[in-house]
Image (cartoon, rainbow, N blue to C red):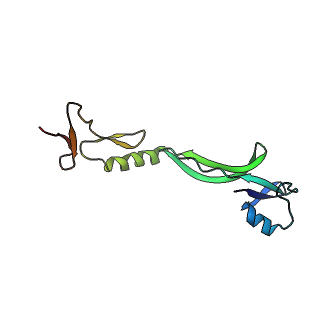
Amino acid sequence: MNLFIRIVDGNVFEHPIMEENFKQAFIGIDTENLPEGFAKFVRVEPPVLGVFEKYVGCTYEFVDGVYTDIHHIVEISEEEKSAKIEEARKKLRPNWTLDEETLTPIIPTKPVDGEYRWDEETLNWIKLNA
């Protein structure tokens, strides 16, 4: 999908336009030879956020000869981080611990001396054929 963006007084004007819409709105403009005031636009998907990051927005900027999305991400505050860790702790089962870097539960390690199944009632590994 080709995208284009309008430039007014050296600044991005509004949002990127899909090629079909661009051709309907700006009849006669050759998308392979854009006049001043128009530019090709390259869409960049937002990155996957880290556990302690938040998305604060997107701007359109000229980078390496093309206009593109610039996604803005910041680290959350220490207060937000503490609250997020505490919320994750509340969701843990009684004998689990929390990996505070990934906010994932650390489940008791499955024994290796035979076959086991996880028992939800006791929250433990139960040896099969015991």
Return the residue nearer the eye: 112 or 76. Answer: 112
Quadrant of the image occupied by residue 125 = top left
Q: Quadrant of the N terminus?
A: bottom right
Return the residue nearer the eye: 17 or 95. Answer: 17
Measured along the vertical axis of the image, is residue 2 above or below residue 79? Answer: below
Which residue occupies the extreme top position in the image?
A: 113
Quadrant of the image occupied by residue 2 = bottom right
Q: What residue is at 85 percent from the left and 56 percent from the top? A: 34
Lateral position of residue 128 relative to residue 65, left or right: left
Q: Position of residue 128 (x, y in %)?
A: 16, 40
Q: Quadrant of the C terminus?
A: top left
Measured along the vertical axis of the image, is residue 8 above or below residue 45? Answer: below
Which residue occupies the extreme left position in the image?
A: 130
Q: Position of residue 98 (x, y in %)?
A: 34, 41
Tell me if I can see residue 121 in this picture: yes
Q: What residue is at 86 percent from the left and 62 percent from the top? A: 29
How many marks are shown on the rendered structure?
0
Q: Position of residue 115 (x, y in %)?
A: 21, 37
Lateral position of residue 91 relative to residue 83, left or right: left
Tell me if I can see residue 76 in this picture: no
Lateral position of residue 59 relative to residue 38, left or right: left
Q: Position of residue 106 (x, y in %)?
A: 32, 39
Return the residue nearer the eye: 43 or 27. Answer: 27
